[in-house]
Image (cartoon, rainbow, N blue to C red):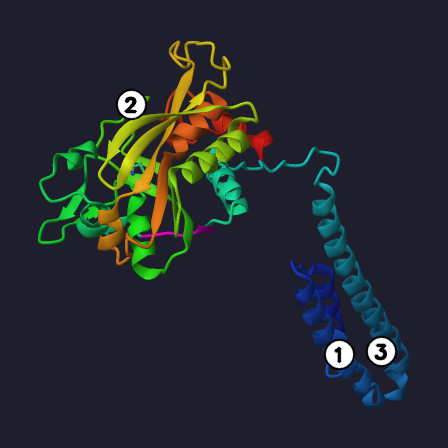
């Protein structure tokens, strides 16, 4: 039995552990209820009387050694955990998170929408993958009509009613008139697609906002006043508008709207190419053929429509000279608009 005490003592001196769990296992194995040291204490009563003194002394020595070792191992583990925590320098500057900013196109689109919402317009949206009926046919572009060449189209399928990527948001006008009864007052923002070579002034993907107002007795004067109110909100209270006669199959009469140049105030500069005016949108009175095609009686109702490019409005507002910047997502460019939110 003395031999066993010696073996255990030796083992205790040499034992090495890596985790707190191993320390606990060691404690249970030696000092637990059924532990080896505990068992030796139980056997103490069987030891002959003459050996009791010596055996008792050795046994206590063993118990103390085991208790001390376990405590030492625990302490070592705690110290090394503490040491690794302290290796972190709390005085080092922290990592900063780069905050993103909203895209100028989103900012502009939201601003356009919020102005028209104040005039009682509600939001309408439609699909980007459309059919010929909603993009052309119902908007008074007959098949083979040369006006279709105004918009170079990406076709997806041929057939009676070809599928295509919408070239303008005017398709949402059609969807709205087909499903709602007048009075209708909607603003329709969305992405549009045209088969154009990408340059500083043209892109194959861009954004438009369309407006449509249909009711009894809506006149060209209403259109003019609504647009004037919009441009004053968007470009400042001194902004003037000019309407030039134009042609769109879906409006009669049609007009293109210019604003007085917000850089030179109309005197003429290189932004407005010396004219004092900047083109911002197309508009007109909804053609009676369009109303009929969408199930609205043109003898009872009239209406106006307008459509503008969001990139164009943003370019004029912030003097962005190259359309491609909007798509490159260079954060240095995007950050310039942070303060506009
Ligand atoms: N859809 C036309 C375009 O993309 C813009 C436009 C012009 C929309 C006149 C209209 C409008 O609603 O009345 O060029």
For the C terminus, the image quarter is: top right
> Which residue does the numbered mark 1 point to in the structure image?
32
> Which residue does the numbered mark 3 point to in the structure image?
55
**Horizontally, is 161 left or right of 121 in the view?**
left
Who is closer to the viewer here, 88 or 46? 88
Sequence-first disc among 1 and 3: 1
Q: On the image, which quarter does residue 189 sit in?
A: top left
Residue 84, above or below 284: below
Q: Position of residue 145 (x, y in %)?
A: 11, 38
Local secondary structure at mark 1: loop
Which of pointers 3 and 2 indicates the residue nearer the eye? 2
Highlighted range, magenta = 122-126
**Residue appearing at x 54%, y 37% in the figure:** 100
**Horizontally, is 4 left or right of 304 in the view?**
right
**Residue appearing at x 39%, y 48% in the figure:** 217
As for residue 123 lying within the magenta part, the answer is: yes
Which of pointers 1 and 3 indicates the residue nearer the eye? 1
Sequence-first disc among 3 and 2: 3
> Which class describes the residues within 10 Å of circle 2: few (<14), some (14-19), or many (20+)?
few
> Which class describes the residues within 10 Å of circle 1: few (<14), some (14-19), or many (20+)?
some
For the N terminus, the image quarter is: bottom right
Q: Position of residue 68 (x, y in %)?
A: 82, 63
Q: Which mark is residue 199?
A: 2
Q: CA distance from mark 1 to mark 3?
A: 20 Å
What predominant SS class does the magenta segment belong to? Answer: loop
**Residue appearing at x 14%, y 50% in the figure:** 162
**Horizontally, is 258 left or right of 295 in the view?**
right
Image quarter for ligand 1: top left
């Amino acid at each position: 039995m003395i031999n066993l005490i010696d073996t255990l003592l030796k083992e205790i001196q040499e034992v090495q552990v890596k985790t707190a769990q191993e320390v606990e296992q060691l404690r249970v194995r030696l000092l637990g209820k059924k532990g080896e040291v505990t068992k030796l204490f139980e056997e103490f009563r069987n030891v002959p009387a003459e050996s009791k003194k010596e055996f008792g002394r050795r046994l206590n020595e063993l118990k103390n050694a085991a208790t001390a070792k376990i405590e030492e191992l625990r302490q070592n583990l705690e110290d090394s955990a503490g040491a690794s925590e302290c290796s972190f320098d709390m005085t080092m500057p922290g990592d900063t998170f780069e905050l993103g900013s909203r895209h100028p196109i989103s900012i502009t689109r939201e601003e356009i929408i919020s102005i028209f919402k104040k005039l009682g317009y509600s939001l309408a949206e439609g699909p980007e993958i459309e059919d010929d009926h909603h993009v052309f046919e119902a908007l008074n572009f007959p098949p083979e009509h040369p006006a279709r060449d105004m918009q170079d189209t990406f076709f997806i399928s041929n057939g009676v009613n070809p599928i295509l990527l919408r070239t303008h948001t005017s398709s949402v006008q059609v969807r709205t008139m087909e499903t709602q009864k007048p009075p209708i007052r909607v603003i329709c923002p969305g992405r549009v697609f045209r088969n154009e070579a990408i340059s500083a002034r043209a892109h194959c993907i861009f954004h438009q906002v369309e407006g449509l107002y249909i009711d009894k007795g809506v006149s060209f004067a209403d259109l003019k006043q609504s647009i004037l109110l919009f441009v004053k909100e968007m470009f400042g209270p001194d902004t003037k508008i000019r309407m030039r006669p134009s042609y769109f199959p879906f409006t009669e009469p049609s007009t293109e709207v210019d604003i007085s140049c917000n850089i030179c105030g109309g005197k003429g500069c290189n932004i407005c190419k010396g004219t004092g005016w900047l083109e911002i949108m197309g508009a007109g009175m909804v053609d009676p053929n369009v109303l009929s095609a969408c199930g609205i009686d043109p003898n009872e109702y009239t209406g106006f429509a307008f459509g503008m490019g969001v990139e164009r409005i943003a370019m004029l507002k912030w003097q962005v000279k190259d359309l491609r910047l909007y798509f490159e997502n260079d954060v240095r460019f995007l950050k310039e608009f942070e303060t506009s939110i």
